[in-house]
Image (tube, rainbow, N blue to C red):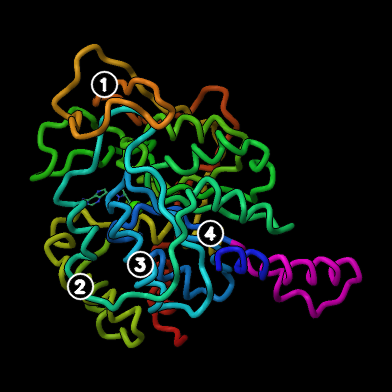
Amino acid sequence: MIKSKFIKQCAILSVAATTCFTGNAFSANAAEKTPVIFDTDMAIDDWSALLLLAKTDSIDLLAVTANGVGETRCAPAMRNIPALLALATEDEVVIGCGDAYPLDGYFTFPEPWRQQADTLSGVEIADGTLPITAKHPVHIIHEAIESTQQKITLLATGSLTNIAQWIEHHPEDVSKVEKLVIMGGSFDTHGNIIVPGFTDGHPNKSAEWNIYVDAIAAEKVFSSQLNIEVVGLDVTNEVKVTTEFAKDFKKKAKTEAAIFWDKVLDDNDWFINSGEYYFWDVLAALVVIDPSFCSGEYSSVTVSYDLIEQPSQWDNQNIPDVTYTGAKRKSYDPATFGVLRRGGDNKPAKICKKTKSKEAFSLFTETMNKSL
Ligand code: AGV
Ligand code: CA
């Protein structure tokens, strides 16, 4: 099943490639679709980003890889991804999950957020039919890249654990990737680790959650030769989810995907009212769909991390003391872990600074309401 998806890609693409050489315009459609692998932690707005990608005609969603490091754990993620895809596409999509813990450090998302993410915010939908592969995302991503001559776009909207492991195992793949779009980080604005009622008193004022939970993975990714576009808080602050948007979306919701999403918004009125909810991952998906959603500048990005002698109160003691490589897991200073800064020697990444927020909300609403 998994292979057949990639073989299908190969077949289409080899036809496209042949006709490209012969200049046959008929092949243009197949070649024009952007092949995408979506690496997600399946939190609330990852669901809408997933539905959006699956419903966008110009995207060929090859695979959805999750990790159990972010908000949703692997078992529920492997139920929720096929269930959501069934609302949005009839295409085959390869689905698998990676590690449950970060490459290093002991930080995790607050447990109530994880519960909400595991359970799709309490909104019930039927199981999907797409199969799950036991393959690790490292292999899923590698096989997808091997299967096509087109350059794949990666979108990562959770911690960068899977992407870092894939780079470690398959450094030869890096030059075959078009780009990696990351939802994560913050540069010229405050971070989002401190959330009233969940992380009061946390010492980290500057990091963003996806980078913070696995800053060592982020460091490996930013120091690679990948072409990176960063959709961080600087730009996602422009797409706050408001009650007005939720009302407008409700009026227009008519497809299964949109009706599901409307129910999620209903269940999250408290989140919307708290002013803490943004279209973080949706905007990153929109940048994949249309790069003009990101205006920005290029700069090297350096990830901060500082070892500490004594574990802090922010360490989650349930995380195993051995990392996936067999090394002893280390404790890091929660105040600086995952803070990004411009500068250093890494290959410059594009840092998104401005977007088109009105168009972002309207393209999202329109795409979610397109019939299958
Ligand atoms: O930091 C943004 C990332 C996005 O990938 N996530 C949520 C999105 O999936 C973490 C996050 C930040 N603040 C949160 C988050 C909050 N208040 N509740 C749940 N998750
Ligand atoms: Ca996410």
Nearer to us of marks 4 and 1 is 1
The residue singled out by tag 2 in the image is 123
The residue singled out by tag 4 in the image is 288
Q: Which residues are magenta?
A: 9-35
How far apart in space, not on screen, are marks 4 and 3 (Cα)? 14 Å
The amino acid at mark 4 is Val
x and y percentages locating residue 30 in the rendered image: 70, 73
The amino acid at mark 2 is Val
Mark 1, secondary structure of its residue: loop
Nearer to us of marks 2 and 4 is 2
Nearer to us of marks 3 and 2 is 2
x and y percentages locating residue 295 in the rendered image: 52, 51
The residue singled out by tag 1 in the image is 333
Name the quarter where the N terminus is drawn.
bottom right
Chain-order first, disc 1 or disc 2 = 2
Nearer to us of marks 4 and 3 is 3
Decide which of 152, 134 is in the foreground and name it: 134
